[in-house]
Image (tube, rainbow, N blue to C red):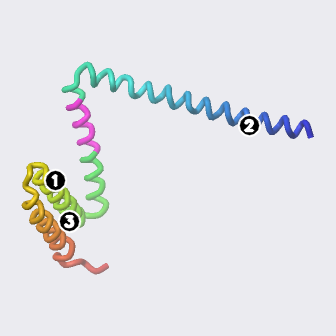
Amino acid sequence: MILNIAKGYKKLFDSAIKGILLLVACAVLGAAIVWPLWKFATAAPNVYTMTMLILIGAVLLIWLAKYVKKVGAKYATLKLGKIMIIAAGLCGSIVLVLNGKRFFAIPVLLVMIALYGVISFGPEREKK
């Protein structure tokens, strides 16, 4: 019985040590990644901003190319059109509201909904 209790405490302490080591490993790896980026951002903010924008743009471009290749150009164009219509409508409405032209935000939202409907339900759908 004492042997079973000792084994249980050993398992408990092993789990606690593994958890602490995992936290330490995460902290060290996080610091190793974040500290150079922070140093770069504070030393040369303009270069850092351009570098990050270029990297994010490249990743998005690669992702977009893979997506278009996977689903086809027509479907991807329709999907991108829907996203752009929603983004433009919401951004336009927000800008109008923030500039004090709340009345004009309503037609922008209505046009957004109408254009989304045209793109979503207007073109002939290919039957699979």
Q: Residue 54's spot in the image, x, y percent?
A: 22, 36
**Residue extending farthest top:** 43
Magenta span contains residue 56: yes
Q: Residue 97's spot in the image, x, y percent?
A: 13, 53
Question: Would you say 116 lies left or right of 99 here?
Answer: right
Q: Earlier in the sequence, mark 1 or mark 2?
A: 2
CA distance separating discs 1 and 2: 54 Å
Q: Mark 1 = which residue?
A: 94
Which amino acid type corresponds to the residue marked 3 in the rendered image? Leu
CA distance separating discs 2 and 3: 56 Å
**Residue extending farthest bottom:** 127
Q: Secondary structure at mark 1?
A: helix
Mark in the foreground, 1 or 2: 1
Question: Would you say 54 lies left or right of 100 here?
Answer: right
Mark 3 neighbour class, 10 Å CA radius: few under 14, some 14 to 19, many 20 or more? some
Q: Mark 2 = which residue?
A: 12
Q: Secondary structure at mark 2?
A: helix
